Amino acid sequence: MTSSGLFYWATALLCVVVAALASDIMGFFSSANHFDVKGGTVMVTGGSQGMGKAVGRLLASKGANVVIVARNQQKLDEALKYISSAAARPSQRFLAISADVTSAEENIRIINEVTEWNAGSPPDVVWANAGFARPALFIETSIEDLRSQIDINYLAACYLAHATLKSWLRPAKSISVSTAGQSQAARPRHFIMTSSTACFVGVAGYAPYSPAKAALRSLADTLRSEVNLYNGYRRAHPDTGPRADVNIHCVLPGGIQTPGNENENLTKHPVTHLLEEGDPAQTEDRVAAVAVKSLEKGGYLITTQWLGHAMRAGALSGSPRNNRFIDTVFAWAVNVAWLLIGPDMESTVYKYGKTHGVDLPA
């Protein structure tokens, strides 16, 4: 078979798998809800704007008590009004906390404050969503910006995960017992990290941002493995184990149509714009809706649009699969297509430098 024929069949298979994956994400293959937040308490960092605010409003509409965290108190107050207006019932509660999530101590304070507000119980869902990109070529980025991108896009979620899991994995003070004498299953707890499709593929101009998001995906893989240890212990020792099972998830959106994205475009190198030309962008509400729908289906590594689905499939490596069959076939098709896509991206950057020149360091 010629390379063009191979690419044709890989593309055709890719289209079929994308359609199947989209149907799966939209819930056509499963009706069980693995992410029921009604009556629970959800905490979202980066919740004053963008995707975080959209997630907060959506979960409020599903009956959750919502806590949002960000730095700017005025933006928090405005976002809280917007989120609480979507409440499904009058008894729901809402809270805004101003904090610097790049501080380990602040993350401990946040969890303690939410636990106290929540009648002594830690939040049922914690969504580490804070982050932003400052795109630029690597050698044109200051050391201060390199460090701050790691702080907000990786360490903030890392610190929050550490504080949250230490709170969740303490021995339960009491266990509800059914009439049959067996412990009732408590609602699973969910720790969710917002990474980015930028973690899947190296794109010129994202060196300050992509490595931190790749580290976040790796942290999610590792924590998903580690929590099995505690979940297993809990099942074997219901009287002394943690109160509930813990699930880890990683959401990886692509471009989002927000003011933050507009600010990012101001610092992007022209070659980055060229590489991203034609890439799909979604509204914050659409990203939130797709992400939550996938969480309800039990998804782990969650992308929110077709390009992200393809990038995820081609870079799964040792990450757990959302659907073993679809992800395996999809990965094969993407890797065949990448035989042409990868070299084309490399060539685009090379030709840009050859034609337009670059600013060399002094």
Image (spheres, rainbow, N blue to C red):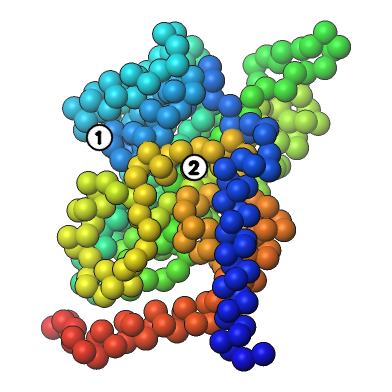
Q: Quadrant of the N terminus?
A: bottom right
Q: Out of 29 and 211, give the one closest to the viewer.
A: 29
Location of residue 157 in the rendering, given as x and y in whole percent from the top left corner: 43, 44
Q: Amino acid at mark 1?
A: Arg
Mark 2, other Cα within 10 Å: few <14 / some 14–19 / many ≥20:
many
What residue sits 54% from the left and 20% below the top?
A: 38
What residue sits 68% from the left and 32% below the top?
A: 32
Work out whether residue 82 can be spotted: yes
Work out whether residue 122 can be spotted: no
Location of residue 276 in the rendering, given as x and y in whole percent from the top left corner: 33, 67
| Residue at numbered disc 2 | 291
Q: Out of 101 and 347, give the one closest to the viewer.
A: 347
Quadrant of residue 4 within the rendered picture: bottom right
User: Relative to 193, is 242 on the left or the right?
Assistant: right
What residue sits 75% from the left and 18% below the top?
A: 184
Tag 1, which secondary structure?
loop
| Residue at numbered disc 1 | 71
